[in-house]
Amino acid sequence: MLQDMLQSRRKKLEASLNEGETVIIFAAEPINYPAYFLQESNFFYFTGLDTPNAVLFQIKYKDKLESMLFIERGIPEREVWDGKKTTVAEATRESGIEKVYYLDEFYDKISSWLVLTRKCWINLGNRQLLSSPNRAQMFVSAMREKNPQILYDDTSELLRKFRAVKDKWEIEQIRQAIAVTREGILTIFSQARARMMEFELEAILNYEVYRRGLRHFGFKAIIASGINAAILHYIENNSKINAGDLVLLDVGARCNNYSADITRTFPVSGKFNGRQEKIYSAVLSVQKAVIAMIKPGVSLIDLNKRTEELITKELLDLKLIDDEKDFRKYYMHSVSHHLGLDTHDIGARDSVLEKGNVITVEPGIYVPEERIGIRIEDDILVTARGCEVLSASIPKEIEDLEKLCGIQGGRK
Ligand SMILES: [Mn+2]
């Protein structure tokens, strides 16, 4: 099924390119070898391959997309140490690309095509002032002299509209990532106790995800208890959880490079106190109201505006602010982003929703002076007439959380 999808993605690319336009995508380099390799998202999108250091070259010529894939040549003496490289046969079979060559043939094979190229889309990425250039940037510098007629642009501009609409296979991967993340969250709900360290909950999450066959996460888990939950990007996860604290989990396993992104906030002792319950209910009702708005034609800007209005009203009711203008003091971020190969997936911040988009909805209220930070985040698929909450089976109602979480009094 992935092979069919890869084929149809390349067909769509073929239809959208002008004659003589070229797309060059460099795969990721194995920087943290051997600990962790994460493929470059655009490369994965068109090849389905986790092969490091490869290059995908595509050009539209005579109305047809020519695709060529370049991979590292396996050297037997090295493979004794590093393991086998992807072979030409494997790369062809998995990607469906027939023309697979070795990297040392790259310039020979592409030079005659580059003469025909006016415009080249390439994954340049960002150039940091002091860092060394990446392979795409080095390639462009080298080609400027040989083929000065070529105009270069970053692939993200071109591929935004492709990747924002998920195909069936992609939605399946996100569902699977969510299903596995759910198991981790439910186990944390049942095993978390006061006086545990936050990183113990991270260990539970890791174990539950690993043992279901997923090895990676979309991002470093945020496991934040009490006042730490009011620090938006708290990733230290190294505090002791106090009895009575709320614990915020912002977590997401990755399945075939597609990420889940879920936030739940729960009472470690198994019961919300009055104030926690009030603030939690406020966040939950805002979240539900915003999710109810989602359908094709609504923009992320609409969702943000509505969230701000609703949160402002809640903050006034909670007596946290007296002046509407002050809502930013307790709600500092935006409510939604696209989700996919990247946790913050490409897809413009002002994009108008269409069928097949997958986005998050994640309002929060953060009150450090009361040691409370609450965020609730679900992953949502935009459907023809509305939406489907992909993470709907992960509990977030107060009575469900109180049933599932903790035993009062802490660990024996
Ligand atoms: Mn998110």
Image (spheres, rainbow, N blue to C red):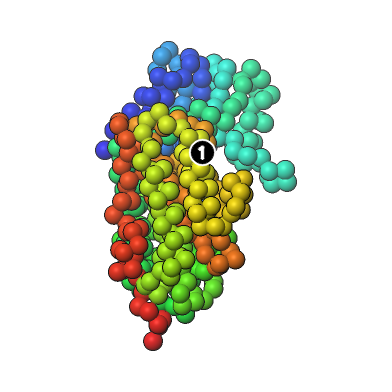
Q: Mark 1: few, some, or many residues within 10 Å (few <14, many ≥20)?
A: some
| Residue 247 in view, yes or no | no
Residue pointed to by mark 1 = 305
The residue positioned farthest toward the left in the image shown: 1
Mark 1: which secondary structure? helix
Q: Residue at x 49, y 51 (%)?
A: 314
Classify mark 1 as within 8 Å of ligand 1 or not, answering yes or no: no
The image quarter in which residue 252 lies: bottom left
Instruction: State the quadrant of the C terminus.
Output: bottom left
Q: Nearer the viewer, residue 276 or 177?
A: 276
Query: As shown in the figure, which amino acid type bears the numbered disc 1?
Result: Lys
Instruction: State the quadrant of the N terminus.
Output: top left
Q: Nearer the viewer, residue 316 or 144?
A: 316
Residue 142 position in % (x across, y down): 66, 30
The residue positioned farthest toward the bottom in the image shown: 412
Please give left or right for residue 343 compared with residue 207 in the image: right
Q: Is residue 221 above or below residue 144?
A: below
Q: Residue at x 55, y 35 (%)?
A: 123
Residue 5 position in % (x across, y down): 32, 33
Residue 97 position in % (x across, y down): 37, 32
Residue 185 position in % (x across, y down): 36, 63
Q: Is residue 214 above or below residue 14?
A: below
Q: Residue at x 49, y 76 (%)?
A: 242
Q: Nearer the viewer, residue 79 or 380?
A: 380
| Residue 270 in view, yes or no | yes
